[in-house]
Image: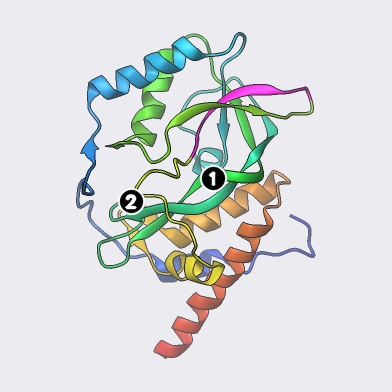
Amino acid sequence: MPASRRMRLTRRHVDHVHRPIDDPGPKLLPGFRSATEDDYSEAVAGMLETRPTGDFWLFGYGSLIWRPETAFEEKRKGTAAGWHRRFCLGPDYRYRGSPELPGLMMALDRGGQCTGMLYRLPEAGLEQELHRLIRRELSQLPSAFPWRWIKVRTDEGPVPALTFAMDRNNARYVAGLSDTEVAAVLASACGFLGSMAEYLFSTVTMLESLGIHDRKLWRLQSLVADLIEARLSASR
C-alpha cells in the first residue's frame, strides 16, 4: 500500500481481541436446517449445469482472496458492477462470534461496485473442487448467500463468474447498522476460527497488497482500531 496510507488496525490490535475458544458445533437458527450431502451434490450439479460456455471462473471478494478454497490455474483482478462488500450477514455464534458476542460476517450485497479477484478453476477435477467450495460456503438452509452467476469486468474483457451473494429476503440479512455499530461488533466478537478484527485485518491487508482500496472497509478498520485502543486504555 502507499507509504502515505498506513492501516490503523494492526496485528497488535488483533492479538488483543483474540482468545482461544473451542468449537461449539453447529447452532441452527429458527427456521433453518443443516445442509446434507444431497444438498451439496444438488448445488454442485446446478453450478455445472448452468455454467456459461468457456472457462469456469470464481469471483472472490472477502476471505476467498486471502484463503482460497479451491485449486486455480489463473487469477486476475475484476470488478462486479451492482454489488458491494458489506458486513450484513449475522448472527455468527460459532466461527468468529459467540452467543455472548455474535459476529457479523461480510457478504456481497446489492448496489455500488466491488473489485475483487477472479480465479480460473481447473477443468480436471472441477466437480471435486466445487464440492470443497460449497462445503465451506453452505452450512445451513435456506442459504443466506446462495451461489449465482454474475458478470465481472476485467482488463481482458467481461467474464461470467460464480460467486456467493446475499439474499436480502433471508432472516440472516442485517441492514441499517451504522459504521460505528458495525465496528463495535468487529472490535469485540471472536469464535473458534478467530476474531472479527482478524477477519477485517486480513481482508483489508490483502486488498491493499493487490492495489484494491475499499473506502468503506478502510474506514471500518480505523474505527475498529480506535475502539480496541479505547477498551485497552479503560482497562488499565
Q: Quadrant of residue 116?
A: top right
According to the picture, the residue beneath numbered tag 1 turns out to be: 109
* In the foreground, 99 or 232: 99
What amino acid type should be assigned to the residue bearing mark 2?
Answer: Tyr
Residue 106 lies, with reference to residue 37, above or below; the image says below
- Quarter holding the N terminus is bottom right
Q: Can the viewer see residue 83?
A: yes
- Quarter holding the C terminus is bottom left
Residue 182 pos. (x, y %): 49, 65
| Residue at the image point whose x is 49% and y is 37% from the top | 165
Mark 1 secondary-structure assignment:
strand
Residue 90 pos. (x, y %): 37, 54
| Residue at the image point whose x is 50% and y is 23% from the top | 71
Left or right placement of residue 145 versus residue 10 in this view: left
Magenta highlight on residue 163: yes
Dominant secondary structure of the residues highlighted in magenta in the image:
strand
Q: Can the viewer see residue 125?
A: no
Q: Quadrant of residue 52?
A: top right
Q: Quadrant of residue 8?
A: bottom right
Residue 98 pos. (x, y %): 28, 61
According to the picture, the residue beneath numbered tag 2 turns out to be: 95
Mark 2 secondary-structure assignment:
loop
Q: Which residues are magenta?
A: 156-165
* In the foreground, 229 or 155: 155
Residue 140 lies, with reference to residue 214, above or below; the image says above
Q: Report, in whole angstroms, how far the alpha carbon at label 2 lies from the one at label 1.
A: 21 Å
Residue 144 lies, with reference to residue 53, above or below; the image says below
Q: Nearer the viewer, mark 2 or mark 1?
A: 1
| Residue at the image point whose x is 20% and y is 52% from the top | 24
